Amino acid sequence: MLPWLVVGLGNPGPTYAGHRHNVGFLVVEELARRTRSSFAKPKGIKAELAESRLGPPGADGPRLGLTKSRSYMNETGGPVSRLLAYYKITPDRLVVVHDELDLDPGQLRVKLGGGDNGHNGLRSIRSSIGTGDYYRVRVGVGRPPGRQDPADFLLSSFSSREREGLGVEVARAADAVESLVEAGLERTQSAFNS
């Protein structure tokens, strides 16, 4: 049994790999790299899952499932709901990592609950699990310049300037997930909310 499920939001496939909307995938991939975990495809669930344990190899750190949906963003809730049911994880042990237009690149916010703020992945999860009371790690991607449509902005690649700081931002978001699981919300918010 896994006590935590960490979901990185994004769209599957190489077409979307470098897009702002896929920053959640980058964070769970970083966590998998740190824990030397590999993603597998659970039978009958449109997701990739890496069963991981935080801490150095051989340590008895918290166990968690790192997840990337193989469904598109607006259908993410189905796989998340099935994984929660399969592993008997309650929403208070769910962490969703996602892009946030209302935060500038480099900014990060950790919170419990809240609305979907127009985010289709969050809306799908709320609809499928029946609550918005789960943890969120909101990774800033900023607002589109000028009159660019936000959807087009999210489905475009990071600029070269943004890519320069992306590794640090992804690592910091992964640190926030680890802190949330190990130290709790209050300490994590104090340390990471910028």
Image (spheres, rainbow, N blue to C red):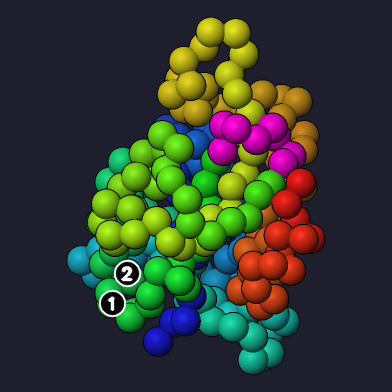
Q: Is residue 78 above or below residue 105?
A: below
Whether residue 171 can be seen here? no
Task: Find residue 35 and report its image quarter.
Answer: bottom right
Tell me if 194 is positioned left or right of 91 in this view: right
**In the rendered image, which residue does mark 1 sit on?**
86
Q: Residue at x 52, y 47 (%)?
A: 98
- Locate residue 186: give its quadrant: bottom right
Q: Which residue is mark 2?
A: 83
Residue 161 x %, y %:
75, 25
Identify the residue at image location x=43%, y=61%.
Answer: 133
Residue 127 - label: none
Residue positioned 32% across, 69% down in the render? 83
Kind of element beneath mark 1: helix
What percent of the width, then of the height, locates residue 154?
50, 28
Q: Amino acid at mark 1?
A: Tyr
Dot 1 and dot 2 residues touching (CB under 8 Å): yes
Q: Amino acid at mark 2?
A: Leu
